[in-house]
Amino acid sequence: MARVFNFSAGPSMLPLPVLQKAQAELTEYGCSGQSVLEMSHRSSWFEDIIAGTEAALRRVLNVPQNYKIGFFQGGASPQFAAVPLNLMGTGSADYIVTGQFSGKAAKEAEKYGRVNIIASSKDKNFTYIPDAASLKFTPGASYVHICQNNTIYGTRWPRLPQTGALPLVADMSSCILSEPVDVSQYGLIYFGVQKNVAPAGMAVVIVREDLIGRARPDTPAMLDYAAVIGADSMYNTPPCFCIYMMGLVLEWLEKEMGGLAAMQRRNEAKAALLYDYLDASRFFKNPVEKPFRSMMNVTFTSPSPELDKAFCAGAAQNGLVNLKGHRSVGGMRASIYNAMPMEGVQALVDFMQKFEAQHR
């Protein structure tokens, strides 16, 4: 069976060359006589893998030397607790709620201190991002938290809040590695890897050195940045295969795609193709205000839920899968992460045109 174009929001499609290399190395990595799936995380083989993956991430993202990188079990959601446990030293933090995941992060943080919701786009069903220039930060807050790209609603921050001395904390799960990032503008970046980086099962934290070592005394060791990062992500057995796969994706991104600037140009072209069609269509609609549209997650609807359902079924029959929107909003969502080729987006637009002509 031919491979489909997988528009899933996560776990998402991985680059075919990466999958093929992993397949070739599955039963024996190098000349180790064993698979990465079964080798000891304390072996010299795996020590080289994890060191190589971290070094590649530093190169690709241009991570400054005064930032540390940690590989954590689970996706981004455990970081909703880890961030306040490690950083909410004043007992207060500012959160900006622009979708479901930033809302969940704020709710989790309420267990550990006072959460100040300083802005929200809930009033318009999260179809825009609050004005960064008009934000007022809370005196005594420990940090400001944002979700930089909203997977469910298809929005993103077009410009970052200028938080001054307050550390900016960003969940970048659905936009990391899609474009260049100035890491120095953040106190902490975290992301689940299952959308644009690797298979599900791991989160990565990039944190400024001076923010490490501030955890509450009752912080579980596995959520304590000083404990995990201080042990070079070897406090316990790390998600070995995820780290290996992330290394392969970074190698593909760096050597075959030409780095993040080149990747951004490809992603912008893919998004433009789909949004241009949506803007011209009298049948499909994108609900997001234009300045805040996501480059990674494109949401849209047809005139009725019944037609939405028929569209998703017909698309799947044509090799365009996982287009159903999140259960909380309905409609459709096309996640067009790095691994999605232009050919996949063009095939989607072609099918949309055909479906529109048949049902208009």
Image (cartoon, rainbow, N blue to C red):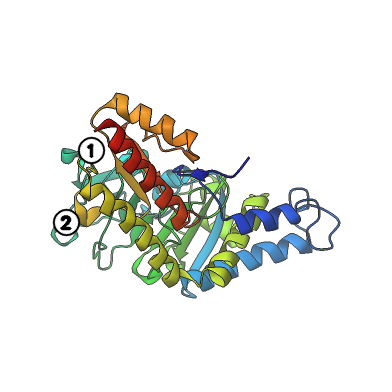
Q: Is residue 310 above or below residue 272?
A: above
In-image side of 196 versus 354 (left or right): right
Image quarter where the C terminus lies is: top left
Nearer mark to the viewer, of 2 and 1: 1
Residue 45 percent coordinates (x, y): 77, 62
Spot occupied by residue 82 in the image (x, y as percentages of width and height): 45, 48
- Three-letter code, disc 2: Asp
Q: Quadrant of residue 248?
A: bottom right
Above/below status of 256 relative to 198: below
Numbered mark located on residue 283 in the image: 1
Q: Nearer the viewer, residue 335 or 131?
A: 335
Above or below, comparing residue 345 to residue 179 in the picture: above
- Above-or-below relation of 232 to 145: below
Task: Please name the amino acid that badge 1 sits on.
Answer: Phe
Mark 2 or mark 1, which has the lower sequence index? 2
Q: Position of residue 201 (x, y in %)?
A: 57, 45
Q: Nearer the viewer, residue 103 or 331?
A: 331
Image quadrant occupied by the N terminus: top right
Residues 310 and 218: in front is 310
272 to the left or right of 27: left
* Residue at position x 42%, y 72% in the image: 261
The residue tagged 2 is: 131
Look at the numbered discs 2 and 1 and tell me whether their residues touch, using CB distance below 8 Å: no
The residue located at (39%, 61%) in the rendering is 267
Name the residue at 80% across, 51% down: 27
